[in-house]
Image: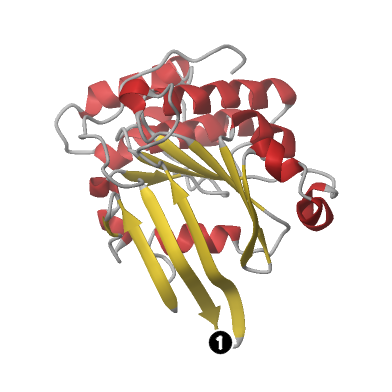
Amino acid sequence: MSRRIPASPVAAHSPAARPRLEVSGLTVTFGGLTALDGVDLTVGDPSGRADQGAGQGAETVALIGPNGAGKTTVFNAVCGLVRPSAGEIRLDGRPAPASPSRLLERGLARTLQGLGLFAGLTVLENVLVPVAGTAGASDAAAAALARLDLTVDAGTTVDALPYPVRKRVALARALVARPRLLLLDEPAGGLGADDVEALADVVRDVVADGCAVLLVEHHVDFVMAVADRVVVLDFGRVVASGTPDEVRADPAVEAAYLGLEAA
């Protein structure tokens, strides 16, 4: 995946009147451990960038921080896999559903660190899973495969493919339902330089099509290349937020995270 990926349309929804995602005062505790402590963040402010046009409200927000900072817990809370102890999570101005099974109908899709692919199924079969039985599923899957340069691999079982290609399959599966908000969990992990560069092109194209992106990533150069805003977590709290340049220049961020070698 070393060339720019042509864009494909995202779902036809009316522009959001509110941010795609609003997280307010999010607190998550596990027994005596506070994993998140009053986290606030937004993704996809409709006032957004002036150059968004039809993609108004689409942006890329990166959530970074050291291991154990609470990044994946934010994702799990947004997706209904973890119940907050306090705070509020809203999608397009409405409370997020408590059940993960309802997220797709609300326009949210997610990739996983562990990919979560079905090893015995083909690439096409894996990509079809989120839209199986829906009108236009075959066309949507074909578009997702083309977007990620996977058409030639459509009939191959995913366990026969190298890891970078399987990561593309996981991304195609997340995009097949044309979400309004895409959560990417360490999308650049385990990829070489060429694949990371191509992934950055895909993320930019997705946002240009009108889909907002929230990503968790340890690959600092990738984050700084694709993010419109960066939110930094440390010990479950937001310690910095701003543009990539603002965050990079923050001494607290340098001490907590950016001084560490990127994974």
Image x and y of residue 157, in percent: 47, 31
Q: At x 54% / y 13%, what residue is drawn?
A: 4
Quarter occupied by residue 194? top right
Quarter occupied by residue 166? top right
Image x and y of residue 68, in percent: 68, 65
Kind of residue at badge 1:
Gly
Q: Which residue is mark 1?
A: 31
In the image, residue 20 sits, relative to residue 6, either above or below, namely below
Q: In the visual, does 86 lie left or right of 216?
A: left
Q: At x 73% / y 24%, what residue is drawn?
A: 193
Q: At x 29% / y 43%, what residue is drawn?
A: 107
Image x and y of residue 181, in percent: 38, 42
Q: In the visual, does 237 lie left or right of 51?
A: right
Identify the coloring. Answer: secondary structure
Q: At x 48% / y 44%, what residue is drawn?
A: 111
In the image, residue 231 sits, relative to residue 119, either above or below, namely below
Q: Inspect this view and state whether residue 122 appears.
A: no
Quarter occupied by residue 53? top left
The image quadrant where one finds the C terminus is top right
Q: Nearer the viewer, residue 118 or 167?
A: 167
In the image, residue 175 sits, relative to residue 19, either above or below, namely above
